[in-house]
Amino acid sequence: MSHPEQIIPHGHILRYNLRERLTHWVAAASYMYLLATGLAFWSPWLFWMAVILGGAPVSRILHPWAGLIFFASVWMMYVMWAPQMKHTDADRKWWAAVRYYSTNQDDKMPPAGRYNAGQKFLFWGFFWSAVALLASGVVLWFPEYIPWNLRFLRYLSILIHPAAALFTIGLFMIHLYMGIFAERGAFGSVIRGDVSIAFAKRYHPGWYDEIVGESSSPRK
Amino acid sequence: MSQATLRVQKISGHAGSVPGEDTQREFTVCKLIDTTTCIGCKACEVACVEWNDLPFGETVFDNTYQTMPQTRWNYWNLILFNEHEREDGSLMWLMRKNQCMHCADPGCLAACPADGAIVQYTNGIVDFQQANCIGCGYCITGCPFDIPKMNPKTHRVFKCTLCTDRVSEGLEPACIKSCPTGCLHFGTKDDMKDLAEKRAKQLREHSNFPNAGVYDPPGVGGTGVIYVLHDASNPEIYGGLPSNPHVPWTVKLWKGPLKWLGNVAMIGGLIGLFVHYLRYGPKAREEEDIGPGGTKT
Amino acid sequence: MTNGWIDIKNTDMMLIMGGNPAENHPCGFKWPIEAKRTRNAKMIVVDPRFTRTASVADLFCQIRAGSDIAFLGGLIHYAIENNRIAKDYLVNYTNAAFIIKPGFQLPGDTDGVFSGFDAKTQTYDKSTWNYAGADGSVIAITEQKVAEVGAHPEPASPPPALALPEKLAYDFSLQHPHCVFQLLKKHYSRYTPEMVERITGVPKEQFLKAADLFTSIRKNGDMKKAGTIIYAVGWTQHTSGTQIIRTAAILQLLLGNVGRAGGGVNALRGHSNIQGATDMAGIFDILPGYLKVPTPTDTSFENWMKRLTPKPAKPLAWDSFNYWSNTPKFAVSLMKAMYGDAATKQNDWAFHFLPKVDRNFSWAYIWDNMYRGIVKGIFAFGMNGVAIGPDSQKNIDALKKADWLVVGEIYPDETSEFWKSPGITADEMKKIQTTVYRLPCAGFAEKDGTFVNSARWLQWKNAALPLPGDAKLDQEILARIYLKVRELYQKEGGKFPDAILHLSWNYTNPQNPALAEVAKEINGKALADLEDPLTKQQIKAGQQLPGYAWLKDDGTTLCGNWLYSGSFTEAGNMMARRGTEDPSGLGIYPNWAFSWPANRRVLYNRASCDAEGKPWDSSRKQVWWSEATQKWAGNDVPDFKADSKPKDHMGPFIMNPEGVGRLFVPLGAMADGPFPEHYEPIESPIENPLHPQQSTNPVVKKFQTEADKFGTAKDYNIICTTYRLTEHYHYWTKNNPMNVQLVPEPFIEVPAELADKMGIRGGEVLKVTSARGVYQAKAMVTKRIKRMTIDGKETYQIGIPIHWGYRGIAEDEGKTARTPANSLSPTVVDPNAYTPEFKGFLVKVEKA
């Protein structure tokens, strides 16, 4: 299957279309807000963040709504990307070689498709965390309406919500690090949507091959 | 709230040290409710509404003498009526005045993320400061007695203050003042405990209540409101008074280990990534020309 | 109350029956609780429902409404059988030893009535209800019969002369077969535990538990302990109401509990000032201070006094104070208070200005007469006549026929808006011609004056709030009406103006007399210089009297109510005193307010001592004979002749001419028998197991209008009783949002077993129907009323709180407007006190 339409002039390939990019940034913005307000409620030492974001009561009111927006964008990503995020044999090999990846020895990595196994993990990690955050978040949103005999839901939620959030924070830190610091080009791709052919060849050879419709051998 | 003579010893969601923390308590105050002499007259309910100037709400008939199913944000003091059949077939009509228990280890305060929204004074009173409340409702989850209630309009949580404004001026709480039978007492925790134990002993020896006892649950560090019960072995019959209340373990896990773990992980993660960057740097440093759009980055 | 609220803390044993003090007297109920807490006192509650009071009782018995005499009679039987009686007390302080006339017969021997019954007139010839004389001499005491409705007896017809013998025959061994004790024993021997179970529905074992517990205070004849009986309108509101209370009095005399701290027979008053209303003659057949009203046969002051003033009747060796021998002093002083200078010896102390009451003007009779078009108008002040019933619809229909209605109230109520009672059509409304005048009255917090509580304390209160809007004080409204009426009499003459024109009205502000001024008048003052011949103490003319001992029958004193004399003396307003000293620790508080009579807290307190004058219980010393001073001394004011030596054997019950407590009530004091007998309520599920041929009270007469319908067990199978709730106060508090929040709407308490049987769920609307009316409300299904077996028959009781009607916050919003609960109750009254039978009538229950 080849997608020559994705090859754009000047040696670039369209990696994310506008819809994908918009979704990403809606998710990113809402997540940033959720992170700031969430951390404010997490630790008294960070409570000032809620205060500067319009006051803690406002934060409490907006946090759940931001959460809904975040979840909606994650859901959109699920709709867009889930088929591409399936775990494959290549991913298994990728994980086996992850130590090379983390030490920047990318030439020793098995070829990855549009998304490498780490990205897929990020995706599914965010997706399932978002589901958990939504479920527990709804309970925490309206604790007064949870009947006393269903109070275990509150008890569960109050644990699940921060645990899931913490997990996303870990993912988020790696995501940010990879996107901004480690993989030069990745950040621009999610702003403008394109990457250089070299970038594609280097990091996502499988995907590159798919687009140009020819076999691409690992870079020597 | 008048806090003229009240010193704080615990503060919710507070960064840094607490002014009154670990100070020697001169005494803690305590309300004793002798359920065996309560007649369910609701004078305490009315006194509470009147003293605290709580707005009236609508109630509906619910096949009971009980005013409403549970306390409300504007109804902090509610007598629970329960019909209970004893093993010998005789009937008991149990009446228990339900309100904030003013736990020594308050779950509401532990769960609260808002700085200063919940405080515990050195006299043991746990008090909500609605000015600092953010309306998150975590206190509702933290409370093992189902006491804090949210005003849906203002998103602020309310509960019995043990009439801090009266107590700080040397008066007893309004409910105590209004009780006609003297089933309510107010004093120091030690005195009330003593009085309660004496009454329980009297009930065991002179009435047909061999299991009479005092309810001062250790799971929450003891409470600032204690009960004398006809049957202390079965507090659940008094409208679901928990037999062994404690702050929910998930709240404890969340506010304890998870908090430490989370903080360590977050800070550790940041440091780790920083170190990683220093050690390995960016992935494609040697191929800067492959930046998106062909521009140099 | 013979005792008082606080005194209950001194008790060892409480029988609470026919009352629900935890519910209706929560403030006073602190004292029963105090007795439990400090004395380990036991509490037995007997009630048709498991009430709030029952919730703190040691023992609860569910009784069928209207079977109280059977239960109490069973207790009497048990006490006598088990010798748990106060023998010395009985012999010395009651008429147990007195011999009854030979012709007297008990209902057990005569098909259910006492001797002398005339079935045709439904009245008793009471001549056999008398003591046997020791020497045959008699003193004439005439009995005045109250005429029947609307009848005008010939004033000239001489009343039948009945008399107590002056010297009584007795047997102090209590063995004489016709002595009161033996008759009592025989009478109540029929009230076996089995019979009690058949009638009351209280299982035999449960009854025996209660009987054993209550009489345990007299185990082995020990006199130290004291037990109290506490009741309220759950006893009075029956067609045998007065007799139920009599049964309690007999039981207390048997156990030697009357006059003692922690003892007595204690009526709980359901209004803040119902005791005051009674003391001040809020009843048609008495004047202030319980002086009986003159009747047409009292042709002169002297005749009237002759009828009212008893002579001592006693065993020869005994003494009797016979305090009512002072009646003329009280009566003359009252006439001086009413008519001042217009009451002179020459004009019989204005006796002829007094109305002579020739018929029954009690509550139910007034409304019956209005219903029949005889009474044309009514003043309803602080009294919601329609709602308080009985038979609300009859009362509504009565008001429709009246020419005018004046209502003095703080809210519009069911009475002032009778013309829009539920179910009325626009056409019907148009036909009503009654003119309704609404006068704005003041609420209790806006008035000063006194409340007289159950403990007989006159407590002065100050106004807490100014009068709102156009509201006027009661005394201003009444004074202005009086002055206007007087003006009309002055102008137009009229049939008999003297009684109005000569009324003493010497108030500083005649338009609005200050209540303190009225209180001083009620206390009484000297009209001439007085001197006590013994102490030489002097009182100048115009000075307030220190007490009723100073009252004279020569017109030199004035007193509005002899019982209240001492309440407002030269020393000031005794009712406003707030001294909290209680040196004896018995809760006497002698310097708190004023307790009638003579600031005495426990009545008959001479009986708290043995015959030698030593207290039965040295830890509760109320009064005692002091050898040193040769006088009675005490922590309380001795209810006795201060210098009467114990060896003179004066009886402690000084208001009776016998000087002793009456197990047997002689002559005309009771309409329906010298001993209480169980009669079924007028509407009852069974025939009286004691005597089916005379099931109900033989002297109870039914009203005869078409509204007076009665149901039978065939059509109406459920017993219904009515009551109040703590959360509401009669029919006012449905105007107060706080009370409405506490209990928002009416309900019907239904036994869970009946609900199961009928498939009723809590909250479902029920329709309750009696022969007279219909009531609808939601069901409260509860285990607190249980199925009963009455004389072998499965029987259920339901209960209806009375507080709702068609005027109030919720009612005005159209939520719960409905007929009052008393639409169901029958207009049939007790023959002694004329109290309607609100408790225990028949209904049927359906899902609405």
Image (spheres, coloured by chain):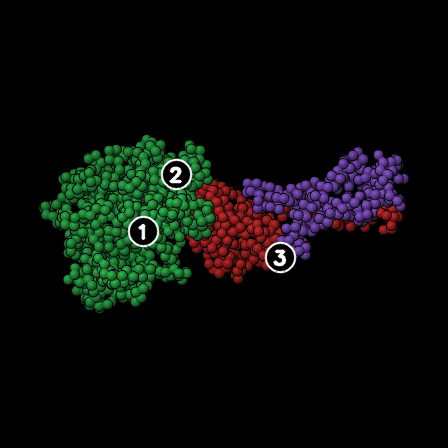
Which SS class for mark 2? strand
In the picture, measured across the screen, residue C478 lies left or right of residue A203, that is left
Report which colour depicts chain C: green
Chain letter of the purple region: A
Q: What's the colour of chain B in the image?
A: red
Residue at position x 44%, y 47% in the image: C811
Question: The residue marked by circle 3 belongs to what chain?
Answer: B
In the image, C5 versus C89, the foreground residue is C5
* Res. C404 visible in picture: yes
Both labels 2 and 1 in a single chain: yes
Q: Residue beneath label 1, please?
A: C403
Q: Check disc 1 and give the amino acid type.
A: Asp
Marks 2 and 1, how far apart at CA:
33 Å
Quadrant in the rendering for residue C119: top left
> Dot 2 surroundings within 10 Å: few (below 14), some, or many (20 or more)?
many
Comparing labels 2 and 3, the label whose residue is closer to the camera = 2
* Identity of the residue drawn at 60% across and 48% down: B138
Residue labelled with disc 3: B17
Say which residue label 2 marks: C768
Q: Residue at x 38, y 57 (%)?
A: C440
Secondary structure at numbered mark 3 = loop
Q: CA distance from mark 3 to mark 1?
A: 81 Å
Look at the numbered discs 2 and 1 and tell me whether their residues touch, using CB distance below 8 Å: no
Q: Amino acid at mark 2?
A: Val
Q: On the picture, is C111 further left or further right than B103?
A: left
Which residue is at 69% across, 42% downward? A129
Between B189 and C335, the one lying in front of the other is: C335
**Closer-to-camera residue (C364/C328):** C364
Of residues A19 and C587, which is closer to you in this image? A19
Give x and y (percent) for residue B271: 75, 50
